[in-house]
Image: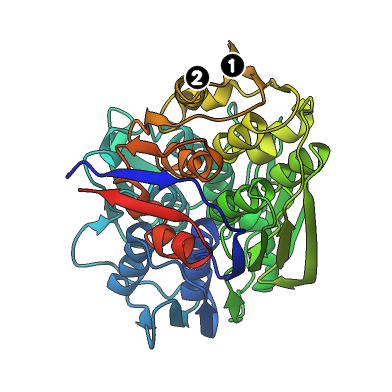
Amino acid sequence: MTVIDWTSHPVHAPLKGELTIPGDKSVSHRAMMFGALADGRSTVRGFLEGEDTRATARMFASMGVRMEAPQPGVRIVHGVGIEGLRASEGALDCGNAGTGMRLMAGVLAGQAFDSTLVGDASLSSRPMRRVTDPLASMGARIDTHDGKPPLRVHGGAKLKGIRYTPPVASAQVKSAVLLAGLYADGETCVIEQHPTRDYTERMLAAFGWPIEFSPGKATLTGGHRLRATDIEVPADFSSAAFFIVAASIVPGSTLRLHSVGLNPRRTGLLEALRLMGADIAIENRRESGGEPVGDIIVRYARLHGAVIPEAVVPDMIDEFPALFVAAAVADSPTTISGAAELRVKESDRLAAMANGLRILGVAVDETPDGATIHGGRLGGGRVEAVGDHRIAMSFVLAGLVAAAPVTIGDCENVATSFPNFMDLARDCGFDLAQVH
């Protein structure tokens, strides 16, 4: 892969505009799955045109589900019903999509035919026992390669409902168990020690499957049907986060972000920024496919430091790199704790953000599970994204308000998660260029 560097220049005018952020990946995956298993035709708008979600669509197409793509971001899914899938002629290729593989394992566990799930080199190195073990306790028969892909799912298993508490909080594991529960005799219940995102539960309800859920608990029984429904995939909140912070820190700015997903398990950043004095409003609240959505309007506000409550940390774990930049320009220190998970994401995000901010002249005191960022004036310089798309986009924000340009090394992974980031950024006033 070619190494790509970006340079973000200080801006001397407010950011302005109305933006449509790409669709939520988690919702796009599930819309394909439930549309395929439903009775009737579902139209999905706002579908994320990414490799991961396209892989999920291709897998269902290979199992006999007809899908149309009349235009980018739109899929018409002709559902075959809960028992209408047929065996694929070859292996089902998940590409790099861990969500796709883990959720598909739950769907395939209840089918009458054998299936094999494969992935690329990266996915083939990821652990799958945390999904295959609970599925096995339901009666599924899944072979792995030392606990890793490929997964060989044997058809014809008679599944039974279970009561399961995952040892590690994971929306993917919860979803796999619930999806297998659609095909199981009796009741399936997942109880979590720490609540995870509830996309699967909300969308099952939207497709008409009887399910009871609350934070940390979901219960359903098998033997029902899914009814086709039209889904508007909300804009991805994690992608919107960069523009929320940008408008908060560039003087005079106002940005409106249309139809952003507002799932409460995702939006901790809004609470954190408001504690720091941000001016953020939400209009046009509504629900689509079981998911709350709305338009986010962000206006510049002078930020002050804050102690970020640990209770909101799980609901903003992907947004911390952007929050670090907001903290770096605040007029007093910001303290973050309870975020040890940041050290085991695509990179050690705590270390990467702390190191980069220090290069730009900001004092940062690291702790094992967080940091204190001493806000002030950002200088220019060169920082490294260490191949992490969220680190790269966060330092772009720093460049907007720095005393001199900020060059970010190793930005190519942004294209896989947010391919039109640079175009949207330039449209609303960023001065951002690729370094040749």
Residue at (65, 71) in percent of width and height: 289
Residue at (50, 26) in percent of width and height: 353
- Report whether 261 appears left or right of 36: right
Measured as percent of width and height from the top left, residue 11 is found at 52, 51
Total numbered badges shown on the rendered structure: 2
Quadrant for the N terminus in the image: top left
Is 275 situated above or below 54?
A: above
Residue at (44, 76) in percent of width and height: 73
- Secondary structure at numbered mark 2: helix
Q: Nearer the viewer, residue 268 or 198?
A: 268
Q: Are there few (<14), some (14-19), or many (20+) residues within 10 Å of tag 2? A: some
Measured as percent of width and height from the top left, residue 185 is found at 61, 55
Task: Tell me, for residue 363, which label it has, or none.
Answer: 1
Measured as percent of width and height from the top left, residue 98 is found at 39, 45
Residue type (three-letter) at the residue carrying disc 1: Ala
Residue bearing mark 2: 358
**Residues marked 2 and 1 touching at CB (< 8 Å):** yes
Is 375 situated above or below 55?
A: above
